[in-house]
Every structure is written in structure tokens, then in C-alpha cells.
Image (cartoon, rainbow, N blue to C red):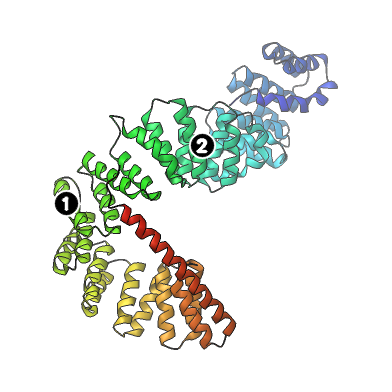
Amino acid sequence: MNRSLLPVATLLAASAFAAAQDTHLQKAVELLRQQQFAEALPELELAHRAQPASPEIENLLGITCTQLDQLTTADAHYRRSIELNPKLPGPHKNLGFNQFNERHYAEAERELKRALARDPSDPFTHYYLAILYLATSRDALAVEQLPASTTLLANDPESRFQMAKACLNTGHGPAALELIQSLAQTQITPSKEYELAVLLSEKHFYPEAVKRFEYVAAADPNSWAAQYDLAIAEINAGQPDKAIPILQSVAQQQAAPSSVFSFLGSAYESTNQLPQALDEYQKAVQADPQNPDHYLDYTRLLMDLDRTEEATRIIEQGISETASTEDPYALDLRLGVLRLKQARFDDARTAINQAIALHPDLVVGYVALAQSFMQQGSDDKAVEPLLKARAMLHQDATLEYYVGLISLRLGKVAEAEIALNNSVRLRPDMVESHYQLGKLYTQTDRLSQARTEFECVIGLAPANSSAHYQLSKLYAKLGETQKAAEMADETRRLMQTQREAALARQKTHLAAFQAPQ
């Protein structure tokens, strides 16, 4: 902290007091104004001899000794001033300032709070409290002091930087961004730019993170790592087209990690350049054949394109390559799903059961096993692994949804209602559970409750044409003719939009069977 901040405000407040005192005090104050602290000290000592009970002179002696790095003596003068007049805010504030610099944080906080109680409008006290709370990692308390200390923080880039981080950590995004923008006008090191960029990314301020990563990359244009970070920030900011040329450049670097190809594949996929995406996912697998994530990325897109046989070969390769180094749980599950797409149900269940054996505490394996029976129309068998998981594991919204769905298909309405309500309770934003509840209430002639559920679906997923269709029928039953007609029109519009989107996807997918140029 800059100690010159301490006397400026205090001395101005003391000038009126000094004018009526002896010449030694007047001369000392003038020297202090000129920041000639060594010359001011003997004059203050002479004034003190003449007025040994003056709390103001004790305070000025404390300020002077502080500037001369005589902190023990300064603290003694402040404490003596407080003894003489506890109501003066200055000595409490100045003692708190020194205690902070001496890292006696508890006493510093106590004295600064006393100063604030005596003068709540003093920006210096708010500023000192702010930097104390920042130094002791109490971000929420630091941010409370921000409005009253903004002016002083403008002269303290380091504390402004720390305050920006505190604002981000406590959910005060607009205040953080304002501080960060002001920091752009000052010198800030690339390492701090990087720290801010990472924190902004973590808090989902992606466009602002891009700006900071741009500064970092500009500071070290030969660093492929800086370029890599910038590219990922561009992807997070929804600008994959900007990330592609950066990642292409990084991919040519000898030390670049295999994840560069994976992110490049993701960027191509986001821009519907699917042949190029497949090519990059394949490169990621080749660059690091023991990384299961690369196989999952590659086969996910192959599955989306209905290239099931090819995806199966890749995932089997992944299981073989990673067997000795990685947990094959995700790869076994993916193989099970692929076998389901090929209607090889026994093989699918073998792979899924292998995954469950590895992690019996994870719900997704049991759900996949249930789906294998559902696809064969064996709902009575499908519910068994779900009930087993329900008895073993913590409650899970997805698990309850499938129990409810299968119970509904089996005609067990009461069990279905309990499970679907459990799912909604555990995850209120789960669209599928609300939709199935709406259907259940419609079947049991509880139209008002069905209406609530379908309207909830539309609130969560406005483009859900099935919910619009169900509501159009429901409004008609309830005699709300106008609403029924409007909902039917909206259903037709959504279905047309979805058909057009499906055709566009099909055209894009067909292009993905072509080799990239």
C-alpha cells in the first residue's frame, strides 16, 4: 500500500487546528504538506512538549513516524491519541492502517471499524477495509466496501485487480467488468491478464475472457499455448469460426497436445463442416490413442451420422488401446449403445453389464440396460434394473423418470405418478418428466393438472411441438376454443420448422460421407 495516501487526507483535516497553535506546530504542518517528514519530526516534538495532552499532535506524530518507517513509535502515538480522545476517527484509522501493514489483521479490522463508526463517510477508511478484506480472502466483505472506495481504488491497480476478482467470485459481474475495463487503461502484466481470463471463463463471461486472452496472446505471439487458450475462449464465446484458423496454426506446432485436434473437430462440427470435423477427431485418436475422450468424440459424431458400423470399430479399438491405462466404463457404455442401434441386444447387455460392474454406483448404466429391454418391448424386464438401482443409490431424476415412463407403459399409473413426481421434485427443469406427467393426468381425466404440466413444458422448451399439440386438444376439451385454435396453429408452425431443420441436417449429414478436401 502507498503510505503517502495516509497523511494527505488527515493533514488537510488538521490544518484548521494547526492555525491556532504555536509556531512549531504550524511549521511542522507546513513541512508535512511538503512531505519533509524528517524535518517535521523535531518541530512536532517541540509542539508536543508544549501540549503533551493534545490528541491531535499525538496523531500527527504517529503519521510522521509512519512515513519514516518508525512503526512501533507511530503506533504508540496513535494509541496515546486514542486514550486522550477516543472519539477522533483519525487515530483509529491510522492505527488500523499500520496494523494492516504489520499484518496484524484482527486489530487492524477492529480499529478501522471504530474509525468508520465515528466517520462513515471517510473513503480512506472504506478503502483500507476493502484491501484488508482482500488480503484476508474475504471477498464478500471487500465488495461491500467497493462503492465508497472506488475513487481511491482508481489509483491502486493491484487492489483494483484483486477487487475485480472478488466481484467475480461473489457474483457481482457488472461491477467486476467495470473494474476490468478500467484496468485495460493501465499496465497489467500478462500473468494477471491470464488469471482474469481464466476466472472470466469460469464465470461464463466468455466474450470478456476472449479480450483478456487476446492480450495474453499478443504479449507472447510465439506461444502456441496462448493461442490455444484464445481459441478455446472463442469456442466458449460461440465463435468457432474464429477459433478454427487459430487452432489450425496451433495444430502445426510440434508440442501441441492431441486435444487441439479434438477442439478443432468441435469447431468444425459447430460450423457444420462435418467431413473436416471427422478428420480432426480421427487425428486426435491417432495422436493420443490412449485417451478415451477422443474415441467418444469421434464415435458420437459417427453415430449422429448413422455410421454405426464404423463407430463400432472405432470404439472397439478404443477399448483395446486403453485397456491397460484407463477406466473403460464410458467406452463400454458407448459400445453397448452401438450394439443397441444394431439390434444386437445380448451383445449390448454384455457391454453395459461390464460397465455397471466397474461402477455400480452410477445410474447411467442401469438406464442403458433398461433401454435395451424397452427396445425389445420387454417393459416388465426393463423396470427391474431401475428398481435395483433405486434401492441401492441416491435418488436420481433420470432414474425416476424411466421408472415412471415404464410404469406408465405397464399400466401401473400409481407407481408412475409417484416416480414422475419424484423426478420433477429432484429436477424441476426436466422437460420429459413434466410431459409424461401431463399425459398421465390427461389419461386419468385430471385436465387442470395436465394443463399445468404441459404449460410447464412449453415454458421450459417453447419449441416442443408435442406439448403444443397436447395443449391444443386439452384446451378444446376445456371449452377454450380460441386457445385451442391458436395452439393448433403453433403446433403446425413448429412441425414445419422442425421438418425444414431435419432436411437441412440430412443434407449436411450426406455431405459428411464425402472425404474432406
Residue 464 appears anywhere in the view: no
Out of 345 and 108, give the one closest to the viewer: 345
Q: Residue at label 1? A: 319
For image coordinates 15% across by 46% down, the residue present is: 321
Out of 124 and 157, give the one closest to the viewer: 157
Amino acid type, mark 1: Ile
Marks 1 and 2 close (CB-CB < 8 Å): no
Mark 1–mark 2 Cα distance, whole angstroms, equals 40 Å
Q: Secondary structure at mark 2?
A: helix
In the figure, 389 relative to 76: above or below? below
For image coordinates 57% across by 80% down, the residue present is: 483
Q: Which mark is residue 218?
A: none
Residue 29 position, x and y percent, is 76, 18
Out of 67 and 441, give the one closest to the viewer: 441
Amino acid type, mark 2: Lys
172 sits left or right of 402 in the view: right
Q: Quadrant of the C terminus?
A: top left
Give the mark count: 2
In the figure, 118 relative to 188: above or below? below
Residue 274 position, x and y percent, is 33, 50
Out of 108 and 129, give the one closest to the viewer: 129
Q: Earlier in the sequence, mark 1 or mark 2?
A: 2
Residue 11 lies in what quarter of the image? top right
For image coordinates 29% across by 44% down, the residue present is: 516
Residue 381 appears anywhere in the view: yes
Residue 247 lies in what quarter of the image? top left
Residue 338 position, x and y percent, is 21, 61
Q: Residue at label 2? A: 211
Q: Secondary structure at mark 1?
A: helix
